[in-house]
Amino acid sequence: MSNKFKNIGIFYNPKHFASLQPVCEKIRLLSAKNFKIFMLKEQEDNIFENVNYLDEFVDEKIDLIIAFGGDGTMLKVLKQVLTENTPVLGFNHGKVGFLSECEKDEFNKVIKKLLHNEFSIEKRSVMECKVKNNKYFAINDIEVGRGMYPHIITVDVFLNDSLLYRTNGDGVILSTPTGSTAYSLSAGGSVLHPQCNALIITPNNPHNQFSKPVVVSDNTNISLRFMNGEHSSLLNIDGINICKLNPRAELSIKKSDFCSKFIKIEGKNFCQIIRNKFNFGED
C-alpha cells in the first residue's frame, strides 16, 4: 500500500452539486483509508466530518489536492498551490473537463489505484507574464484582446528580441501545452502534447490570413508590443480578466521556474483522453 500521500486537500465547485452529500461520502471514504483531510474555511460545513480547515492550502503541508468540478476549478486549485509543488487530481463534474484526469463516477476505483501506487506525477510548463512591475502566472493561456472595444488590435510579436510578425486582428493567444486544448484550439491553434517543451502563439482572427499559429521552444523569451494608437486592449490570463493595457503596452512572457503537477492514473493516456473529450478522428 502507498503511504506517499497522508494529508489530502479537498476542493469542490458548489455549482456542480445540488447537495453536499456526494462530497461528504467521498470524504468519509478517504478518512476510512486513514487519510487526513483538509479543506478551506470558505467551504466549511457541518455536514463534513473529520475535516481540518485552513485559510489557504499553503498553510499546511498538503501532499495531494483532489478537485471536484470543471476546468475552471482545476485552474483555481493549480494556481493556489503553484509555488508549493503540490500535485492535483481532478474529477470532472463540468462539461469537457479536459484538465481533469478522471470522471466523477470513477472515484472509488481511482482511490484504490492511489493506494496501490498505480499513478505517476506529471510536471507541466507554466508561463510567467510581466506587465510593468506586475508578474502573473498562466497554467493555460495568456490572451490579449479588444474586449468590448470594436477595433482592430495591432501587435508586434518578438522572439528573443527578433520580430516574428505584426498581426492585426482581435488579439493574440499564447498557450502552454496544457492550454493548447482551450482558447488557442478554438482560434485555430494546434494541440500540443502535455510533455512538449513548447509554447504556441496563435493570432486571434487575424486580418492577414497568412498570420498563422507558431510553435516555439518554451525557452524562448516572447515579447508583445502594442501599436494601437489611441485604443487600449485587455489582458486575460486563464480566462480571468487581469487589467486594461494602454495603447503602447509591452508584455514579456517566458517559461516560469514553477511547474504545475498533475496526477496521472495508470491505464489512462493522452490519446485516449483527447479522443474521448473531442471525438478526434470521428466523422
Image: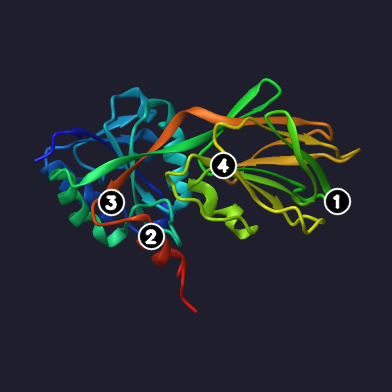
> 250 above or below 207?
above
Which label belongs to residue 20? Answer: none
Q: Dividing the picture into quarters, in which one does residue 226 lie?
A: top right
Q: What residue lies at 71% left-to-right and 23% top-to-bottom?
A: 132
Number of residues whose C-alpha sits closer than 10 Å to that of mark 2, classed few (under 14), some (14–19) or many (20 or more): few
Q: Secondary structure at mark 3?
A: helix
Q: Amino acid at mark 4?
A: Leu
Q: CA distance from mark 1 to mark 3?
A: 46 Å
Residue 109 drawn at (x, y percent): 18, 56
Q: Assess whether mark 4 and mark 2 are in contact (beta carbons under 8 angstroms).
A: no
**Residue at x-position 60% and y-position 32%:** 220
Mark closest to the chain's N terminus, 1 or 3? 3
Residue 7, position in %: x, y? 22, 32
Residue 163 appearing in the image: yes
Tag 2 or tag 1, which sits nearer the N-term?
Answer: 1
| Residue at horizontal 75 percent and vertical 30 percent from the top | 250
Q: Earlier in the sequence, mark 4 or mark 3?
A: 3
Nearer the camera: disc 1 or disc 2: 2
Alpha carbon separation for disc pair 3 and 2? 30 Å
The residue where tag 3 is placed is 23
Under mark 2, the amino acid is Cys
Specify the label residue 199 is tagged with: 4
- Residue annotated with mark 2: 271
Q: Earlier in the sequence, mark 2 or mark 4?
A: 4
Q: 18 or 148, which lies in front? A: 148
Nearer to us of marks 4 and 3 is: 4
Q: Secondary structure at mark 1?
A: loop
Instruction: Work out how far the residue at label 4 is from the one at label 3, CA to CA, in angstroms.
Output: 36 Å
